[in-house]
Every structure is written in structure tokens, then in C-alpha cells.
Image (cartoon, helix red, strand yellow):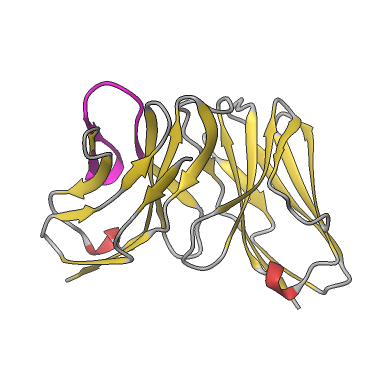
Amino acid sequence: AQSVAQPEDQVNVAEGNPLTVKCTYSVSGNPYLFWYVQYPNRGLQFLLKYITGDNLVKGSYGFEAEFNKSQTSFHLKKPSALVSDSALYFCAVRGNQGGKLIFGQGTELSVKP
Amino acid sequence: DTEVTQTPKHLVMGMTNKKSLKCEQHMGHRAMYWYKQKAKKPPELMFVYSYEKLSINESVPSRFSPECPNSSLLNLHLHALQPEDSALYLCASSQLPGQGYGYTFGSGTRLTVV
């Protein structure tokens, strides 16, 4: 069965500091991994994805994520957080053998000035 | 055009009303999805349309009725809803069903059932 876990409900970071939002997954076969961000009262916006290739994926708004197959992780990172990065972040996974896109429970990121 | 457009943005309906949610995309995507989302929770898949045919129904109550009139349009017909159906309803599309294609989400319809 496919699953994805975001172990932290909330992450608090000071503006200018690096941020990490954690995600681990379990799928059959090779994973397709995604990060989405949701601002209040809005839909989900695509940030980045890993399909194959380089383990470090760069995405929108200065975000990047590192695929680690041995640790089955796909953590989202940004070198310097902005207050405007405060939002709800979802990791999602699908196995390459088919199946639905499975979302994690979400992590609320709060960046304080 | 790289957007998924949902209308209306907000909807308040009584439990005996009939209403419809509309979703439109002009990106040539052949898979379209309806999700339901409660506050600060992940989206829950309701329906998947693949090449205009219903391919997945996640055991959604019959008071929700999807329709895909053409490859650009997806509707969700609502009838006799319950207060617990109040949520953000999100439409999404992807280039093809499955595989590594990302989803493009609309901004959603905020539904309140009174």
C-alpha cells in the first residue's frame, strides 16, 4: 500500500533562516513525488516534483527537495525563509506502477519576522 | 492558458437545494479530478475522469453526481446535501492519468450547507 508521512504538524522558522519540511513515503516500485503549497482559502499550488534523475530537485519560489531512496524521504528545503512562505505544505506520492496520488497530512509552516 | 478555473468561488445552499459546481481547463489535459478538503486537512479524492470517462469513484454518496461533458469541462452536481458536506471542493487536472504528471489545481469552491 502507498503512504506518505509528514511527521511535523507545524514548523516554526525565523525569517532569513533555512527551513526544512519533512516527508517520508512508502510505495511499490519507484516513486513519483510532489510538493504542493496551499495559502489560506486557495487551491494547491505545485512547487516541484521528482520523477527520475538528479536527486536534488529545484522548484518554484526558491524551494528545493532532496530525494533519498535509502531513507525513503523527500524533504522540502529553502536556504532563507520569507514571511510570505507561511502556508500549508503537502507532500504527495504515487508509485510508478499506478495508483492514486496520495497526500500527506500537511505541515503548517510559520515564518516569523 | 495554464489554469484550472472553478466557479462559483463561494456557495451557500440549503439541504433541499440543487446546485452545480463547474470546473474548466484549456491545457489539453485528459484527466480531471474532484477533491473535497476540510480545513487544514489533505484533499480527499472523490472522482477521477480519464478521457472523459469516470474511472474512479471513491465511494462518494449519490448526493454528489459528477459529469464530464467534454475534455475541458467537469461539473459536480449537488442535491440534498448535509451540513457535514460543507468544505472546500477542489478540481484538478493532469496531462494524462497516472504516471509522473503533476496536477494543476483550481482555487476551489467554498461550499456551506445550511
- The x, y position of residue A51, in whole percent, is 36, 26
Left or right: A47 as drawn, with respect to B56:
left
**Image quarter of residue B89:** bottom right
Residues in magenta? A48-65
Left or right: B65 as drawn, with respect to B29:
right
Residue positioned 51% across, 54% down in the render: A43
Quadrant in which the N terminus of chain B is drawn: top right
Left or right: A37 as drawn, with respect to B43:
left
Up-down relation of residue B46 to residue A82 (above or below): above
Residue positioned 47% across, 50% down in the render: A44
Residue positioned 42% across, 60% down in the render: A39
- The x, y position of residue B16, in whole percent, is 89, 71
- The x, y position of residue A72, in whole percent, is 27, 39
Up-down relation of residue A79 to residue B100 (above or below): below
Front-lying residue, B3 or A19? A19
Front-lying residue, B41 or A111? B41
Left or right: A35 as drawn, with respect to B45:
left
Residue positioned 63% across, 41% down in the render: B33
- The x, y position of residue B103, in whole percent, is 50, 37
Quadrant in which the C terminus of chain B is drawn: bottom right
Up-down relation of residue B76 to residue B49 (above or below): below
